[in-house]
């Protein structure tokens, strides 16, 4: 059995690791190639795009893929829809591996918005020293906000256009609560901007913001394809993959134990 993991996330790497000991199983992880030095998963790896839906269908057929797991970032954009369309055309079962989103708790001062543009529009009324944790590709949305100072944290340096008053912090999670507390204090941050990426690796910033009473602008996740089973954890994805090898079990069945 050949499993294609559309990866780039910690969950994708963990899934590849878990599948490494599965008998009679070939795993290929596909990375988009947007990061020059990515953390490579266990097993075979390919880097680069497929060339849209047609290219993905061709690759799946040429490499005799039996199942696809879309473990890309919740904000990866069109790849989830391409995977759904390609899986339908190729007749291959598809699972989406998605970490649960964050949920506000007592003490949080969240301002939920639908896009980076909406986040930028909300900032002048909230503060003047902004901590951006939205990735290096979205800074253009904040480029026209004169009078605000920005600290942007990303794995690699962003490309213009960028805000005029910008300090870039190159770093990669996971981050600690003590580290996030110190960062907010040292840079005198009064607003945090983040995407609802979910997961524990970058969640300490939310706790640090809650402790200091900072407003947090949270960009909601974009729409996802309908009709695709979703697993919240790599272990659930392993169960789903094993189920695809069981004769008589419907392809694409919900992988979560509580759903059966």
Image: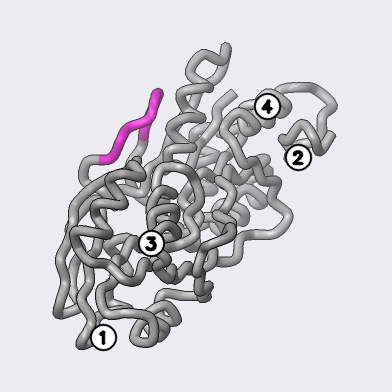
Q: Residue 254: which numbered mark, if any?
A: 2
Whether tag 2 and tag 1 are in contact, CB under 8 A, the answer is no
Badge 1 element: loop
Q: How far apart are labels 3 and 4 at the CA level? A: 41 Å
Circle 3: is it few (<14), some (14-19), or many (20+) Cα within 10 Å? some
Q: Which residues are magenta?
A: 38-45
Can residue 84 be seen in the rendering of this structure? yes
**Number of numbered discs overlaid on the protein picture:** 4
Residue depicted at x 21% and y 87% = 146
40 is within the stretch colored magenta: yes
Q: Nearer the viewer, mark 1 or mark 3?
A: 3
Q: Earlier in the sequence, mark 4 or mark 1?
A: 1
Circle 2: is it few (<14), some (14-19), or many (20+) Cα within 10 Å? many
Residue depicted at x 51% and y 35% = 4
Badge 3 element: helix
Q: Quadrant of the N terminus?
A: top right
Q: Nearer the viewer, mark 3 or mark 4?
A: 3
Whether tag 2 and tag 4 are in contact, CB under 8 A, the answer is no
Where is mark 4, residue-wise? 239
Circle 4: is it few (<14), some (14-19), or many (20+) Cα within 10 Å? some
Q: Quadrant of the C terminus?
A: top right
Apparent side of residue 216 relative to residue 169 in the rendered image (left or right): right
Q: Nearer the viewer, mark 4 or mark 1?
A: 1
**Residue in front for this viewpoint, 17 or 179:** 179
Q: Quadrant of residue 193?
A: bottom left
Q: Say above or below: 125 vs 162.
A: below
Q: Say above or below: 26 vs 119.
A: above
Q: Quadrant of residue 188?
A: bottom left
Where is mark 1, residue-wise? 145
Q: How far apart are labels 4 and 1 at the CA level? A: 48 Å
Prevailing SS of the magenta stretch: loop
């Amino acid at each position: 059995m050949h499993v294609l993991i559309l990866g780039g996330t910690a969950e994708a790497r963990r899934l590849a690791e878990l599948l490494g000991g599965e008998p009679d199983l070939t795993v290929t992880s596909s990375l988009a190639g947007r990061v020059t030095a990515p953390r490579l998963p266990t097993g075979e790896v390919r880097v680069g795009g497929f060339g849209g839906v047609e290219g993905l269908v061709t690759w799946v057929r040429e490499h005799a893929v039996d199942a696809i797991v879309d473990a890309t970032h919740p904000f990866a954009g069109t790849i989830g829809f391409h995977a759904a369309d390609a899986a339908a055309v190729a007749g291959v079962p598809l699972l989406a591996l998605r970490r649960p989103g964050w949920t506000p708790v007592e003490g949080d001062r969240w301002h939920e918005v639908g896009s980076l543009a909406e986040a930028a529009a909300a900032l002048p009324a909230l503060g003047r020293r902004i901590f951006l944790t939205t990735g290096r590709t979205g800074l253009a949305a904040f480029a026209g906000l004169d009078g605000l100072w920005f600290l942007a944290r990303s794995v690699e340096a962003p490309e213009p256009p960028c805000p005029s008053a910008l300090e870039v912090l190159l770093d990669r999670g996971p981050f600690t609560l003590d580290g996030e507390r110190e960062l907010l204090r040292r840079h005198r941050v009064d607003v945090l901007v983040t995407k609802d990426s979910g997961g524990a690796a970058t969640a300490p910033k939310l706790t640090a913001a809650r402790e200091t009473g900072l407003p947090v602008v949270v960009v909601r996740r974009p729409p996802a394809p309908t009709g695709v089973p979703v697993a919240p954890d790599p272990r659930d994805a392993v169960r789903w993959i094993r189920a695809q090898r069981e004769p008589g079990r419907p392809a694409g069945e919900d992988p979560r134990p509580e759903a059966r």
